[in-house]
Image (cartoon, helix red, strand yellow):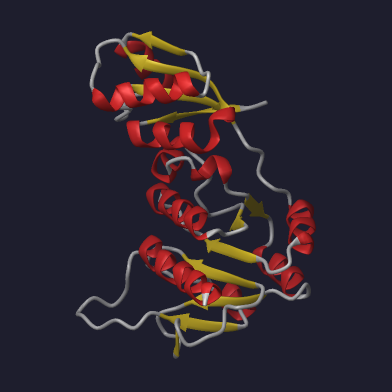
Amino acid sequence: MPSTNVFGLHAVHSLLLNNAASVTRLYVSEARSDKRLAEIQALAEEKHIQLQRVAKKALHELVGEVKHQGVVAVCSLREPLSEPQLLKMVMSLEKAFLLVVDGVTDPHNLGAILRSADAAGVDAVIVPKDGSAGLTPAVRKVACGAAETMAFCPVTNLKRTLAELKSMGIWFYGAADTATSNYTSVDYSGAVGLVVGAEGKGLRRLTKEACDDLISIPMAGTVSSLNVSVATGICLFEVVRQRQL
């Protein structure tokens, strides 16, 4: 099974809490000894994961010159969903909650989006295979364990996938700053998919046309738009709020 490295104190701690079974090896710097590292060590012992102390140089060899903060977990990768697996999963859900991320290339934004999607209870995140950030180590670090638990599906033709999902009863709302519908004024109580676009450019034309409705977040200040990960989190938790009523 393929593996990847997750690094950073918060990311590794979240990984051990939420998906310890995926961790195959855990390395910490022999030069570091503090409360935060002690918490990781205690959690690793609780989860029966062997921790190995190594020189800082060995950590650099694993992940390069990044801010690993003295801790690196090697974990087995959760295989991305194929399109047929995605459709099968959606068919089994009573009320699907999907997130479509159209061409977000910044790994920090995608990582933050995955973290919010996991917290909001999203069933799957769908991205185009081309022109989108993948599940890189940088994405996994920002996602703080969500990349190892969230169902993630890269698709070849996003418009076609949306059409197939719409035929199964999913209603798609695309976030666009030109939309006239307030994001709080639409009904998310059924099977829904939220569609968000790339940094700066927003949704591509074909993706926007594939949505059933477009929504926007009212802006009261001087800035014209929010960061895509922030806007995504706001919209996701409006879905959560409505479903909890």
Residue name at image x 69 percent, y 69 percent: 95
What residue appears at the point 41 percent right and 31 percent down from the top-left corner?
Answer: 12
In the image, residue 202 above or below residue 6: below
Q: Residue at x 72, y 74 (%)?
A: 166
Q: Residue at x 62, y 56 (%)?
A: 124
Residue nearest the observer in this picture, 145 or 214:
145
The residue at the far bottom in this view is 180
Residue 3 x %, y %: 58, 26
- Compared with 185, 227 (above or below) is above
Q: Quadrant of the N terminus?
A: top right
Is 51 on the left-hand or right-hand side of 149? Answer: left
Q: Quadrant of residue 228?
A: bottom left
Residue 40 falls in which quadrant of the image?
Answer: top left
**Direction left: furthest residue:** 222
Q: Would residue 223 be found to the left or right of residue 60 on screen?
A: left
Image side of residue 166 versus residue 193, left or right? right
Which residue is nearer to you in this view: 132 or 144?
Answer: 144
- Percent across and percent down for residue 58 are 37, 12
Q: Position of residue 73 (x, y in %)?
A: 46, 24
Q: Quadrant of residue 191?
A: bottom right
> Taking 57 as reference, is 162 above or below it?
below
Question: Closest to the observer: 51 or 134?
Answer: 51
* Above or below, comparing residue 181 to residue 9 in the picture: below
Total numbered badges shown on the rendered structure:
0
Residue 126: x and y, percent? 61, 58
